[in-house]
Image (cartoon, helix red, strand yellow):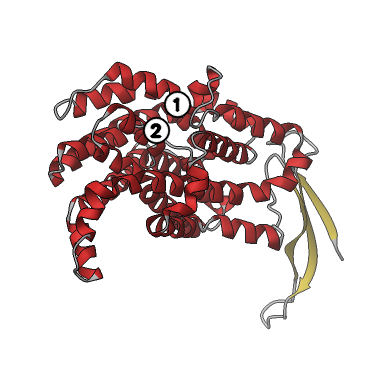
Amino acid sequence: MSFTLTHRLFLSPPQRTHLRFTFKPHTLKPIVSSPSKPSYRPIVSSLSHNSEHLSVTQAKPRWENMLSTAASLYPLYVTVGGVVACFKPSAFAWFVERGPSSYSFSLGLIMLAMGLTLELKDLLNLFTQRPLSILFGCVAQYTIMPTFAMIISKTLGLSPSLSVGLILLGCCPGGAASTVVTFIARGDVSLSTVMTVCTTLGAVILTPLLTMVLAGTYVSIDAIGLSISTLQVSPILCFASCDLRLGDVVVAPVLLGSYLQSTFPLVVKMITPFAPLFAVLLSSLLACSVFSGNVVRFNSSIVNASLVSDASLVSRLQSLLSGGLGAVILSVMLLHFTGFFVGYISATICRFREAERRAISIEVGMQNSSLGVVLATTHFTSPVVALPPAMSAVIMNIMGSSLGFFWRQISGSKQELEDQE
């Protein structure tokens, strides 16, 4: 004997959610004191649920998983590229010599690739549904990094030129690489993208103002000149003025990629699996090129001073790291570590979701080092001022991508991360 009971849930519109239970008789062994009676165990034979309430995640093909794994190896690519830039900077000469057009074109391709992973409605909903997340992230960007840049420079007793360079780095807006790292970390890519846009817009006023306030005690700061240069170099504002400069397109590629994602989903679906890896490789090339094109020119002032002696390689490395360059590396590492840590802790205290915490942490900790290098070489006579931003190009990407890789491993999958929240 069997019968079927259909139960309809009216929490959602009728004929959308059905739970079907099939009862089958199961005869228990008789007990001496009483006659045996049939009992029934419910077995769920089928479950149909509307897609609005239940999302079924399909397993990705093996080749897509391989591409995703390759993209998560961002730290390895930047590390290898940084080593090559140190010992053979001419390897990136073909890219550096074509700058800043090569930088602009690369940045546009990076943002276009990341835009393909977003939907236009996600960006629009961020402004309408979560404006406080954007506001908090922008405030954290321009308070945490500048403040700790000044504290670290005073604590380590850096020279005036290095202190100005570190403070200038801390006052720069978020970089485009932060969006790539946020994607690797399974963070809120939409929030990271919008934060990059907003902080870059604010950089025209806030970067010169904060640099003048915090670094004005070391050297004279031309705030108006810094503002004009930021306006020329800033990716978003240069696009608005149709001026082709370093990183001239950020908004347009992101919006274009999001539009294509929403309008031509089938076509974009075939390209999207390759987009993160493409963005990672291009970001690595851009970071290592900035590093090789700027650090090498400071050899006469810092590096060569430690390598001239006839001491052994170990002794020369110790002398090198114990000198000015070692202090720069330490200060840059401390600055970015503080940005990642304090950014995450502050977002946790304010009870943001885990994906938002990761996006804010990465966005705060990763700066637009290219902008810092351009401003330092344009407005300061000492080449040492540009050393912290130039060193940051590689150090920041190694630290940030390593953090993103760690978060990716502990979160398991995007669906598991959402379930934990």
Q: Amino acid type of disc 2?
A: Leu
Mark 2–mark 1 Cα distance, whole angstroms, equals 8 Å
> Is 359 placed left or right of 266 in the picture?
left
Q: Out of 311 and 269, give the one closest to the viewer.
A: 311
Residue positioned 68% across, 30% down in the render: 259
Q: Amino acid type of disc 1?
A: Ser
Q: Quadrant of residue 15?
A: top right
- Residue 67 to residue 153: above or below: below
Q: Out of 63 and 306, give the one closest to the viewer.
A: 306
Question: From this viewpoint, is residue 397 visible?
Answer: yes
| Residue at numbered disc 1 | 234
- Residue 167 to residue 43: above or below: above
Q: Farthest residue toward the right?
A: 1
| Residue at numbered disc 2 | 371
Q: Out of 401 and 80, give the one closest to the viewer.
A: 80
| Quarter of the figure that contains the N terminus | bottom right
Secondary element at tag 2: helix
> Is 224 placed left or right of 415 in the picture?
left
> Is 286 placed left or right of 325 in the picture?
right
Task: Say if mark 2 contacts mark 1, CB within 8 Å.
Answer: yes
Find residue 346 and name its label. Answer: none
- Within 10 Å of disc 2 (Cα), the crowding (few <14, some 14-19, many 20+) is many
> Is 263 placed left or right of 109 in the picture?
right
- Estimate the x, y position of residue 344 in percent, counting from the top left: 36, 43
